[in-house]
Amino acid sequence: MKKVFKRAGALFTAFIVTLASAFSFFAMNAVALDADYVRRGVVCVVFFLKNAKIVYQDNSGNLKVNQELGDLNMGHGSGFFVGNPGEEAQYIVTNHHVVADFINAKEGETYITYYNTTNSGVDLYVAATSCEMRIYYDSSNYDVAYVDCYGDQNKVDIAVLRLRKPTSQRHTLPIATISDSNVSETVYTVGYPGVADNTLSAESKYGVEDSTVHKGSISRIVYEQGKGVERASTDALINPGNSGGPLVNEAGQVVGINTNSIIRNNNNQIQREDYAITSNEIIRFLEKNNIPFEKAESSSSNGGSTGSDTGTGSDTGTGSDAGTGTTPAPAANNGNGDNTMLIIIIACSAGVVVIGVIIALIVVSSKKKAAPAVQTPAPQMQAPQQSVGQTVGAMQQPRAQTKAVIRSMSMQHNGKAFPVGKAPVGIGRNTATCVIVYAEGTAGVSGNHCTVSFDSATGLFTVTDVGSSYGTFLMGGQKLAPNTPVTLHPGESFYVGDKQNVLRVELER
């Protein structure tokens, strides 16, 4: 019997040690993300078409309707509100590439883009008489937003939208600076991942509870080569539709804007890298454009205050009564209520286990020892082997068997796609040196105008103006410097000399 009480005493001591460790663990990890608070600062940003149709060009060059689509969501991303503390939300930060099609459509006018090619070889386009940027609060409640300012899509991929009137349906989020000292800290991506940009999508829900939160950490802070833009590399997932949403720390402070994801297959090893433009770049952009925002005092996840400093922009917005309908920013949520309850549950559970074991020992010791049962060793189960293809599928792999092409949107090429690889493809009027040849007399096109190449290792295109007379332009109107390569992502467009000569780089099956 002494041996029984000895064992019981050892178990009780172990119980006390475990309970003390649990208290210590939760005391050291008291900070917890208030996900609901962050979600209420995030919205779905939708590029919406009115009276959309699928059209094609007949032999006479006239557009004919193939199918009526009506009003629809053509693509979406995410965004988050910024502004002065206590004022209703009015300004939304997102990525330039989320609103690029709206900007290219002259911010609301006629929109047309290539859709696909039918089996009979007819090229189809999606066209709409007008379009708008919608900020959804739920599936049936939205505001129309306007573009206030935007950066170079190929450098500082940031844009700011502005509502005509402030809203109380969301609140603003504070922004904190970050540095190398924040590497390895916990962060979260928040947004509305779904169908990739510029793809016809089904009806979606855009409520607070529909946004997703993915946890990870900052692995490094880098400067994007050739652009000088500061980005944070993270293992928190950034999927299509997350673009423009915030990367936040555990205090609910914005430390970046979710921008892009790169998936590579190196020797059958899948490598994924997710990047967010850092909050330092966001702050510089907002200050440059006089957009009001709240600057947090610290980006530390260990109790950093949300701060009271505001941005230096002079435009303070038109918010009405301060604080009306807004949710106050929490000073770093310590999660004490949740942690205390969890500790109580753990303590009670451990206590029940200890008492049960003590009773069992007493009962067993009062009986005669039974003959030991023969135990058959349990069979070892091996984890199923997962193929590379399965791994990629779980990570939203790139299209299989894709090829890189340049598609001319000019009527004289009828939307034809031209293959492109590592060797530069010439574009211009010179039939001897150019692959994509424009007719003599085409406005704005030089004999040898520009070249485009594709790097299969990075999945990116490069366009270079070769000293054209009229210039090569990105769709935002930025003119390329001669003989200076500029990187384009799949789905992006540029034009040579005149906006009638638009070309789009794509990856297709």
Image (spheres, helix red, strand yellow):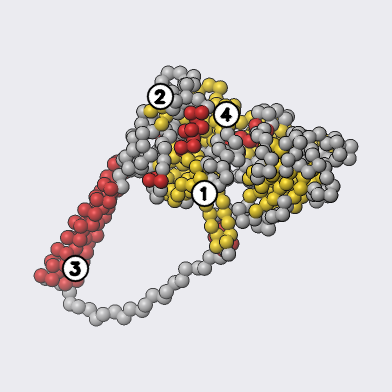
Q: Nearer the viewer, mark 3 or mark 2?
A: 2
Please give the name of the residue rendered at 83% of the width and 36% of the height, measured from the top-left corner.
Answer: 442
Circle 3/circle 1 CB separation < 8 Å: no
Q: Residues within 10 Å of mark 1 (few under 14, many from 20)?
A: many
Where disc 4 sits, the SS reads: strand
Question: Which of the two discs, 3 and 1, labels the residue nearer the N terminus?
Answer: 1
Q: Which residue is mark 3?
A: 361
Where residue 425 appears, as percent x and y from the top left, is 75, 50
Q: Residues within 10 Å of mark 3 (few under 14, many from 20)?
A: some
Is residue 355 shown left or right of residue 233?
A: left
Is residue 44 shown left or right of residue 24?
A: right
Marks 3 and 1 sit apart, C-alpha to C-alpha, by: 54 Å
Q: Which residue is mark 1?
A: 274
Marks 1 and 2 sit apart, C-alpha to C-alpha, by: 33 Å
Q: Which residue is mark 4?
A: 149
- The residue closer to the viewer here, 291 or 7, is 291
Please give the name of the residue rendered at 55% of the width and 26% of the height, measured from the top-left corner.
Answer: 162
Q: Amino acid at mark 4?
A: Cys
Q: Amino acid at mark 1?
A: Asp
Q: The C terminus lies in which quarter of the figure?
A: bottom right
Q: Nearer the viewer, mark 1 or mark 2?
A: 1
Question: Which of the two discs, 3 and 2, labels the residue nearer the N terminus?
Answer: 2
Please give the name of the residue rendered at 60% of the width and 36% of the height, measured from the top-left corner.
Answer: 152
Checking the image for residue 86, the label placed there is 2
Marks 1 and 4 sit apart, C-alpha to C-alpha, by: 25 Å
